Every structure is written in structure tokens, then in C-alpha cells.
Image (cartoon, rainbow, N blue to C red):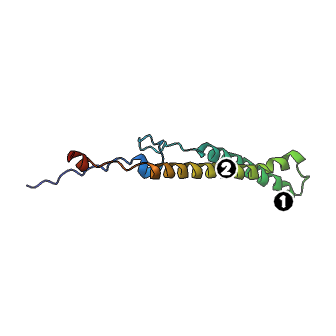
Amino acid sequence: MATTPAPRSAPAASAAVTGTGASSGDGAGNDRQPGDALVRVGGVVFAVGALATAITFVPFFLGTDPFPAYAYVLSMLMGAGFALAGAGFWRSVRAQRRAARAQAAAPPAASPAARAGE
């Protein structure tokens, strides 16, 4: 009876393939890049601002008195969160460009076959 060989596992992605040098290689998606924290914080601030915006419209639909001015100031957090997330995105782009330039400027590594002939 013929048996099939066990499938080979794929080789781990190197930092050159992923574009970052901060790869932990654990495969759990825990790779941190510059700007990630700003994007996350920006998303939370944006969500708080969006919630405040939605809440400030409730009195208009119910015909009650509008909320005080601080409720409308909280609505401005939506724009601030968007700006934070945008800053994090651009920080990540700049870091990836720097890594790509550094990789392109590095001399190519000799292959094992070329070293064996030495």
C-alpha cells in the first residue's frame, strides 16, 4: 500500500518579505509597526465622537431641549480621532518606505551555492 508523504510546512516569512524588521514570527498577528498605536487610539476617539454626535441629535427627534454645549464639543472628537488615525497611517507608511530604502541599499547576500565554490 502506497502512502503519501506528509505535507511540508511553508517556510516562515522573513522580514524582507513582510517589509518590517519588527516581525516576531509567532504567526499570531502580534507584529507591531510604527503608527499602529495612533491608529488604534484614533479609532477609539473617533467612535466616542461618533457616539456623542448621535446622542446630540436625540433631542431634536424627541422635541426636547438640546444638550449643553459640552455635548457638542464631545462631537468634535470624531474629527480629532480621524486626524490621529491618519497620522498613524502616515507614520506607518514612512517607516515602511524607510525599511524598503534600507533593504534596497543593502548589498545582496551571497547564495550558499556561491559560497560553496569558494
Residue 49 pos. (x, y %)? 75, 49
Please give left or right for residue 111 compared with residue 56 in the image. Answer: left
Type of amino acid under label 1? Phe
Q: Position of residue 90 (x, y in %)?
A: 63, 52
Residue shown at 51%/48% (left/top)? 99
Residue drawn where x is 67% and y is 53% of the image: 86
The numbered dot on residue 87 is: 2
Is residue 68 in view? no
Amino acid carrying label 2: it is Ala
Q: What residue appears at the point 48 percent right and 47 percent down from the top-left corner?
A: 20
Which one is in front in this view, the residue at disc 1 or the one at disc 2?
A: 2
On the image, the x and y values in percent for residue 30 come to 49, 42
On-image quarter of the N terminus: bottom left
Q: x%, y% of residue 50?
A: 74, 52
Nearest to the observer: residue 10 or residue 100:
100
Query: Which residue occupies the foreground of this view, 66 or 52?
Result: 52
Q: Which residue is mark 1?
A: 61
In the shown orientation, is residue 73 left or right of residue 11?
A: right
Judge the density around disc 1: few (<14), some (14-19), many (≥20) Cα neighbours within 10 Å: few
Q: Residue furthest bottom?
A: 61
Tag 1 near tag 2, CB within 8 Å = no
As helix, strand or loop, the secondary structure at mark 1 comes to helix
